[in-house]
Amino acid sequence: MRIVVDREGCGGHGRCVAVAPELFDLDDDGISLPLVDELATDQEAAAKDAIANCPQSAIRID
């Protein structure tokens, strides 16, 4: 599984970084950037929290 961010849909609110800083950062444009290529089982809960907290619904797990 991997984290996918809709870069055009991301509003740069940074909630994903606040909720799961081990999984997300913001790039120079303020857009969410996943920090991991493959999501580990123990990271799933944090990723789901970030998804739930994204006001733009710009994050998903594939």
Image (spheres, helix red, strand yellow):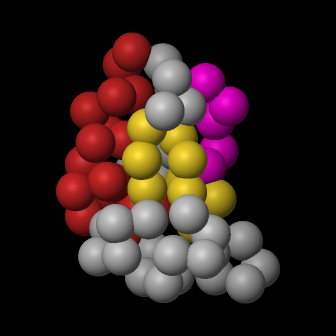
Q: Is the residue 35 above or below the residue 2 in the image?
A: below
| Residue 33, quarter of the rendered image | bottom right
User: Extreme top residue here?
Assistant: 41
- Percent position (x, y) of residue 1? 51, 23
Give the total of numbered labels.
0
What residue is at 26 percent from the left and 33 percent from the top? 45
Q: Is the residue 30 above or below the residue 18 in the image?
A: below
Q: Is residue 16 magenta?
A: no
Q: Is the residue 18 above or below the residue 42 in the image?
A: below
- Position of residue 58 in the picture relative to residue 8 (left or right): left
- Percent position (x, y) of residue 9? 51, 76
Highlighted magenta segment, given as a residue range: 34-38
What residue is at 61 percent from the left and 77 percent from the top? 8
- Percent position (x, y) of residue 52? 22, 56
- Position of residue 40 in the picture relative to residue 38 (left or right): left
What residue is at 34 percent from the left and 66 percent from the top? 57
The reply to whether residue 61 is in sight is yes
| Residue 5, quarter of the rendered image | bottom right
- Percent position (x, y) of residue 2? 55, 31
The reply to whether residue 18 is in sight is no
Main SS category, magenta section: loop
